[in-house]
Image: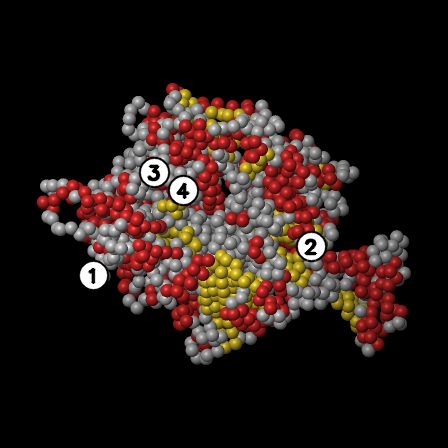
Amino acid sequence: MCQEAEAAARNGAKIIILSDRDAGKTRVPVSSLMALGAVHHHLIRCFMRTQVALIVETGEAREVHHFCCLLGYGADAICPYLVMEILGKLREQGLLDPPLTDGQIFDNMISACSRGIAKVMAKMGISTLQSYKGAQIFEAVGLGVDVVERCFDGTPSRIGGANFAILAEEALQRHWHKEVLRDAETMLVRMEHRGACGSDYDSGDGAGVLTAIPHEFYQTLLAEEGHKLPEPGRYATGLMFLDHQTYRTAESKFEELASQLKMQVIIWRTIPVHSETIGRVARSKEPLIRQVFVVPSDPQMSQDEFEKLLYLLRKRGSHSIASEDLRYYICSLSTKLVVYKGQLNTSQVWVYFEDLKNPLYETHIAIVHSRFSTNTFPSWERAQPLRMLAHNGEINTLRGNVNLMRAREGLMRSSLYSTDELISMYPVVESNMSDSGSFDNVVEFLTIAGQRSLPEAMITLVPEAWQNDPSMSAAKVSYYKWSAFSMEPWDGPAVLTFTDGRYVGAILDRNGLRPSRFYLTKSNHLYMASEVGVADIDPAEIILKGRLKPGRMLLVDTVKGQYVPDDVIKNEIVHLRPTDEWLKEVITIEQVLAGAPSFDIAAHLAKLEIVEDDKRLPMFGYNVETLNMLVLPMVKERKEAMGSMGNDAPLACLSSYNPLLFEYFKQLFAQVTNPPIDPFREKIVMSLASPVGPEGNLLQPGPQQCRRLMLEQPLLSLLEMEALKSINLGDWKSAIVDMSYPATKDVAGLVSELDRMCQEAEAAARNGAKIIILSDRDAGKTRVPVSSLMALGAVHHHLIRCFMRTQVALIVETGEAREVHHFCCLLGYGADAICPYLVMEILGKLREQGLLDPPLTDGQIFDNMISACSRGIAKVMAKMGISTLQSYKGAQIFEAVGLGVDVVERCFDGTPSRIGGANFAILAEEALQRHWQAFADREGDNRLVSNPGFYQWRDGGEKHINDPINIANLQEAARSKSEHAYAKFVESAENISQHCTLRGQLELRWAAQAIDIAEVESAASIVKRFATGAMSLGSISRETHETLARAMNRIGAKSNSGEGGEELRRLLDDEVPTESIRSAIKQVASGRFGVTSVYLSRAEDIQIKMAQGAKPGEGGELPGYKVTEEIARCRNSVPGVGLISPPPHHDIYSIEDLAQLIYDLKSANPRARVSVKLVSEVGVGVVAAGVAKCRAGHIVISGHDGGTGAASWTGIKHAGLPWELGIAETHQTLIVNSLRDRVVLQVDGQLRTGRDVVIGALLGADEFGFSTAPLITLGCIMMRKCHLNTCPVGVATQDPELRKKFEGKPEHIINYFFLLAEEIRSIMARLGIRRFQDLVGRADLLAPSSKPVNPKAALLDLTAMILSDPNADPRPTKEQPPFPYGERLESKVIELVQPVIDGKIKQLELEWQKIRNVDRTFGATLSYYISLAYNEKGLPSNSIHIRLRGSAGQSFCAFLAHGVTVTLEGDANDYVGKGLSGGEIIIRPSPQAPPEFRTEKSVIVGNVCLYGATSGRMFVCGQTGERFAVRNSGSTAVCEGVGDHGCEYMTGGTVVILGATGRNFAAGMSGGIAYVLERNWGFRQKCNMETIDLDPVSDKNDILFLHGLLSEFLEKTGSATAAELLSNWPACTREFIKVFPKEYRKALEDIKVKSPKFLQYQASLDNDYKEEENERTIVTRQHSVDPDPRVDDIEDTLPDPNMNSKILRRLLDKKKGFTRYRRIKTSYRKAEKRMTDWNEIYDYKEVRRGIQVQAARCMDCGVPFCQSQYGCPLGNVIPKWNDLVFQVR
């Protein structure tokens, strides 16, 4: 600067302007005073100063002192440009009052500054500025000699001080402190699409910023008001949300609390805000925002004491000030941090808060957050950031975590706080907190009261998945294991950013279910966000692009100025304490067994009665179904029993068959807010291990926390249970609490017995018992067992209330629990372990009686039971996204349906039970009924042989909606189009509904005067509101699928493709719409089968399947034998290879990701309506409100009773809620939030009659889905064997022979729907309603039934379900704003390439375009137009080449069509190449990247890339995130490294990975090939080997293919890794591993051996039994040679069974036997003759010859027509007897 100034002066310049205008992101401003002083003195020394004028143009100077300094050190004039510009902008924004002109602003500024300068001059007696300029009338305090001599020569500086280095560092800090806040604003604004807006489209769900306290800013503000702030750290401040009317009262109470804690408030300040800039909804709840400043009353108070008291003040204020009448919420109270937040959207934060715009506001850290409210409603208080963190995700285990924190409060002691002080802080988790707020409360508590560092507190609450990670260090495993003894994980998908002023960082959940990307720059600054591209950073400055890995932490220590890697910080934490030594205190079950007296199981079993006579079984509700359908399959197959076709039995609150208490509870599940987990393919993150017994003091780490019993899973054997009863290890002892009571106490005895159990448990805990065993062993003839769940819940909550729960283990020894749902309920309500003794004893006795096949040992029985139950428990946990049993225990993730308030409050506190129901008296009566049935002095039903038909219909047993009468009536009506038959169907269906459903408990309020039915909307119009359910081709046959589609198209309604894709011939079948077999609704599910650009472009509705009614939270699997050629073609897979449908996951694992998928689908088909399918559960209304904010146009609410092709009975029976509750809650919630007009609501789930439809409409539904009923009209007889591929009527099978049996016609469905519509019209006429839309939401036309079907039904309270707002308008007919695509780069590109699409030119290469993160789903709309024009072929290769630079938004190149190539220089976010449909994607780093930027170490694309890709190519020169190439079924990809779960569920295509992989590679991979470079990265250990083989790359074809692909990769990306490999070719091929799926290999071998065309399943029976051909002597296989391909009888396809018994046994097949055997040929005899004799029976030889074959024909179908008046369609009578005959027993 000095040299330039001198040169300018010598060259004749008369004015030299010193300007900092060019300062910005990459240039740091030099102090204007320093620069002026240096230049001024340099020009004096070279005798040039008097030849020029020195003018300073600076953004730094803004006050009188600044101007005086500049003038005093030589400035001739000053331009404070930034002050002027800020004032001008404030005026433009309407924020300057009054709105002055530019001239007035300048004049007023001049006037004020002139007065000030004159005043300063006058202090020294100087009267003219000419004399003052350059006079240097100042003293420097704390400025170094070097600085003074160089810049301020002659100025006294008596104590030395800051040198140039320090001043430069301060300048850099100031520069970055300003940049940090500016970047934070930019980041927040660019994340707008990840937040949500309310009904007014202008009220956000919440947004804010957390920063360091801007001391200079506050000091200046308060100085102007005459207040002086202490130095930083010696005061605390925070913002409070108060009421405009009562704020004085709240402030007074706060000041009083501060005074009690030896602190004082020095000033209150009203935060200046601009209320006019926020939305109507937010403004209606806007608080008065006041800022408080607090200091110690004693200036000498230590800093530690001050910080301690501040937390105490904050907690006491939150507990004691806030009330219903007094609004009070404190955003933060800290000496380091301050939070500005509100119910705002991202663009409003800086506009609303005046403070944030002030140039004096500086910070070295910033955390910004935008909220998308799903589990709770938005509010000012729930906005984030919170006091120490911001949270993106969900805490699924919240209820259990909060309960346990509450329980620990009686145990905790602190060295920092007294007991009384601790008690005043309780509860640690404050009331009405969201999950994020609760977590923040606990972090505060652990860091302040627990004195843990912030990083340690975070890994305590969010540990890595350490239990199944062999690569983790022993020290880290020890630490996490020790930590688990004192705190269960707060589990759920989450990224948590946190800071305490020193540390700022982030941690990701153990599953990696939130995106977190970061940049590290040369200047040592770190940017982390959910997306890249949210801040403008010069690529030349970025040295590393990374991602936060699952369970890992990102940390910056701002004191040391260091970025601390995860392994460094955790290595430091895990060595803080001698956890290895402490863990030696752990007690194991082996130790317990070793010290216990011997227990002879054989002798114990010998004392028991045989199973048939064991009266404990009926006492505990066992029956034949229980054993045959649930228990025995678990023991024999080591997994849960499977079922199909959904649950059509009554709810427990309506059942008259004494259901167990477990049946009243429904499992909750994850949908939208967070994803379920695949517990089998991703079991590395699952753990059933859990410590039990007394916890140590959480606040004082030590070995006492390890003195607990460690159980690897929660079920105990008989031997282990007996050992625990007599435990004698140190001070460990157990106490038994009896869960039975004398039968003589009758109904009234139950409640008093619960009191007794609670008192006994508390007394035992206070007397030192470490284990409390709740046992019903004493139940018997004179004693009635109390429900184990009821007893456990009562004791668990009682111990929590008296702060004793964490001091004991609660173990349940019960004969009642026997299935997975029972165990989950017990664990969810607080059980630490369970011993289901009766199940074990029954199985042992069955073995002794020779009835267990195979006859397993006691050890095998227990092991198999454990294996099955562990899988089942893990699956239920995973539905809710919970990974560890320790977090699941006590989490109460259930809803009670039909359980009274008294029961819930006493035993299940916190569990929702919305309709009331059974009270203690009812439950006691049901228990007594079971006891009476077992021990009554009579023979008959008290024996085990009773079978009430809970799972499958039995004549005289439990009611079922789909009973034979209903099925027969419906089929007769549909086929004959008979109104009389339909009336019979309605009568029987409504009678059943009264006994089974909630809608059956409602009555319609008829109009006083019915209207003429001619005035009612036509049936043709009503049927257009109907849709068939999402049944995929695969779950049902092609014939069924196409018949459904044709029928719905004929009547103008809609059919649904299901998740299996759709054949191209059907997609394009639209010439005659009414005869089309194209499905109008295209479903997009987690499997992404066949989801291509063409598939989406041909949709009218696109339905996102978040959950399935019959098995919400679960995935599915299509076995290989069902994957025929046509299905494989639809799903882009290989025939014969099984296909996995994962749980709803991947790109729908949060609300913002669902919003993105909706955006993707709207981009992929702008004219389609996007629908989201949800399942009824408590809170679904809030979820639906979130979905509406995502801009979905349609929401489906499914009931729990929907059908399914296959699922475990646990899922079918015990997950999800009735649709009546779901649709009512959804409609009401949307009305309250003014969102109802945005969406159309559809309901489905066992809808049958017009009454069902009308009630659905009155509760809020616009449209109606039907699945089971249409299938019944097409011939379904509810055999419930869909999963076995043996449907005898061709509806739900892929067997070609059985499909010939299909006789359904479109007319059958059409007839049914028009009969249904006419019934609806008749009901509408009686209600006085003309238009169907006028029914919607009219719940006032419903009333509870005046004739309840039983006493339990009479206790139900349905008033909340039928609430109605008469002023609400549910019609989605208001003017809808256009879908918010925003200003899209793609729109410009489409315009440019339109000539290629139109065929006017063949090729076009676009110039480089700039892309940003807000440019989302680039390429999808372009592909839509290409797909419409050219179908699946797309354009010729490289017809369009688009070149981009920057950071691409989410779903970059989603569904990219063939013929389009996109090259990106930069990076991209999640979901790159989603659904890739033939296009080519090339992503490489910016050419401006510095030399130290290493592509193989940098992440340049996000998570879940290539998800569901079907064809095309993708080249990534860098690493990818988690779940790369999930469900890839045909694309080719190359990258330089992947995260966890790479190639998961992959079914086709090729992936080459030139770098390290994460864990769980190839989980569920069933097709395609992966080639992985392995250089001691531990790849083999990271693979999931269940479905794959690892081969060397030695085949010449593999080597040639790899060479060609790597050469192309090098050419297109310039990859250094590829160049290095090719330079050492082919020697380097030894470093590659070929990942080859086993099933895929086998299928390819079959294709090679047999024929190019895959032989369909069971196409030739001759090939089924090749090994038997040599044995055959007298048998020639006979197949039908009838030229008519139609089979009139399933027996016509059977071979002659006249063969030797050995061959016969090998040919028989119980699952599909009835398709194998021909009818016995005998001479025809007239029926009249046959009725008069018994010749067929007496023909012993013929009977004997065919008896085993006939026995094989019975399927035990589940709807046993054999017990109905219609008889078995296969002619059998007793399924069990036939099975014994078949086994020759």
Cα gap from disc 2 to disc 1, whole angstroms: 79 Å
Q: Which badge, 3 or 4, comes first in the chain's sequence?
A: 3
Residue linked to disc 4 = 636
Q: Secondary structure at mark 3?
A: helix
Q: Quadrant of the N terminus?
A: bottom right
**Mark whose residue sits in front, 2 or 1:** 1
Cα gap from disc 4 to disc 2, whole angstroms: 55 Å
Relative image position of residue 1358 (x, y in whole percent): 37, 38
Q: Which badge, 3 or 2, comes first in the chain's sequence?
A: 2
Q: Are marks 1 and 4 in contact (CB under 8 Å)?
A: no
Residue linked to disc 2 = 563
Residue linked to disc 1 = 1682
Relative image position of residue 748 (x, y in whole percent): 40, 22
Answer few, some or many: residues within 10 Å of disc 2's Cα (few below 14, many 20 plus, some between 14 and 19). some
Q: Are marks 3 and 2 in contact (CB under 8 Å)?
A: no
Residue linked to disc 3 = 625
Height in image: 1064 above or below 1335?
A: below
Q: Would you say 659 lies left or right of 138 here? A: left
Cα gap from disc 3 to disc 2, whole angstroms: 61 Å
Front-most of 1730 and 901? Answer: 1730
Relative image position of residue 967 (x, y in whole percent): 25, 46
Q: Quadrant of residue 174?
A: bottom right
Q: Quadrant of the C terminus?
A: top left
